[in-house]
Image (tube, helix red, strand yellow):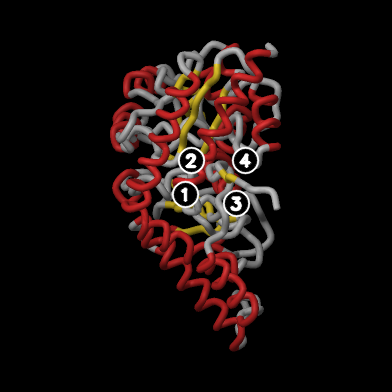
Amino acid sequence: MEREIYLDHAASTPMRSESRAVWLATADTHHANPTGSHKAARHARRVLDDARDVVATALGRPPAEVVFTSGGSEADNLAIRGVLGARGGTAVCSAGEHHAVLEPVEHSGGVTVPLDRSGRVTVDALRTTLDSLDDVSIVSLIAVNNETGAVNDLPALVSVVREHAPGAVVHTDAVQAASWIDLVDAAAEVDLVSITGHKLGGPTGTGALFVRQGITLEPQILGGGQERGRRAGTPDVAGAAAFAAAIEIAVGEREAEVARLGALRDRLVDGLVDRVGSGVIATVATPGDYTRVAAGIAHVMFDGIEAEALLFLLDTEGIRASAASSCSSGAQDPSHVLAAMGIDRRVAEGSLRLSLGHTTTEADIEAALDVIPPIVERLRSHS
């Protein structure tokens, strides 16, 4: 049987056994529509309410703020398009956002804030952008970049928005963040927060948007009064329960896993730099400092090779990785995030994202260090 070294957790992490067990048990026993009035429906609604309580607790928010969605992309779109539909005005986001934020903002004629070389939004850049605009209705700033792992200073950035665009709603795409940073503190002053289940060990197709009380969104899915009129559709009770189980475990293990996986991530980056030499660049890694780079993401660039060829050869050796975000893997154009950071296109073409998660072991890292450098050397010798 072919070995698999799974280093693509930032795209999707394997489902936790505890979450899977809850998912299957709930699907078997709570098949009724929770919006109904009979006994089976009431039981299903109780399970859904319990799941909402758990998800809310993970972010230190009231349960009424939780809008269950089909994942992070829907939550992001509901945030951006929902605010614009209700308020009009101009949308602003960072140039390094996930496409689920970037495209709705750009489609609406919105404005992007440049990144610095570390892949973050600076207070000065955000202030300058906001001061140049009138009628800003929403500002979206990613918590942890899904490609590089760069962590934005959300409290400082929210303060800038409150001062320079006081009427604006603040949203953060925290899809990549919940496993790595404490969103209770980091997103305390944020109005809208997007999270998803499959980055935490929950099922794909689950997620939530937190909506602070008093904020009105134009629903993007019509046809019912579910989720307090903010998102129509029969609720996925089993998915919500499994999502809740996953986020509760992820939050409970976060401190220990950040230390464990951060050490493995540093070992991986340091090992690649040592074995490949000057031809590898650690994009934003700050060894041991998980306040600035998520502990589970190692983003590196190999000068003089193409990511597509590298990923193909890694895959033949059983190593699963990505060139950028999972949404743009396989694309010929370099990452928009790296371009926004000012990284030379030729260097960016050799980018590789190796992301760790709850199933990652020391043996996985050592195997990657044995396999990647010879493949890089092979590609360079034929370039």
In the picture of the structure, the residue carrying the numbered disc 4 is: 320
| Among numbered discs 3 and 1, the one appearing first in the sequence | 3
Amino acid type for the residue under numbered disc 2: Ile
The residue at the far bottom in this view is: 39
Residue at label 3? Answer: 219
Which badge, 4 or 3, is on the more N-terminal residue? 3
Q: What's the amino acid at mark 4?
A: Arg
Disc 1 residue type (three-letter): Thr
Q: Is residue 125 above or below residue 32?
A: above
Left or right position of 258 against 199: left
Characterize the local packing of mark 4: few (<14), some (14-19) or many (20 or more) Cα atoms within 10 angstroms. many
- Snapshot quadrant of residue 37: bottom right
**Residue bearing mark 2:** 365
Q: Nearer the viewer, residue 360 or 164?
A: 360
Q: Nearer the viewer, mark 4 or mark 1?
A: 1
Q: Are marks 1 and 2 in contact (CB under 8 Å)?
A: yes
Which tag is nearer the camera, tag 3 or tag 1?
1
Residue assigned mark 1: 361
**Distance between the alpha carbons at the discs numbered 4 and 3:** 37 Å
Residue at image point 36% right, 41% down: 263
Which element carries disc 2, helix, strand or loop? helix
Marks 4, 2: nearer the viewer: 2
Residue 155 in sight in this render: yes
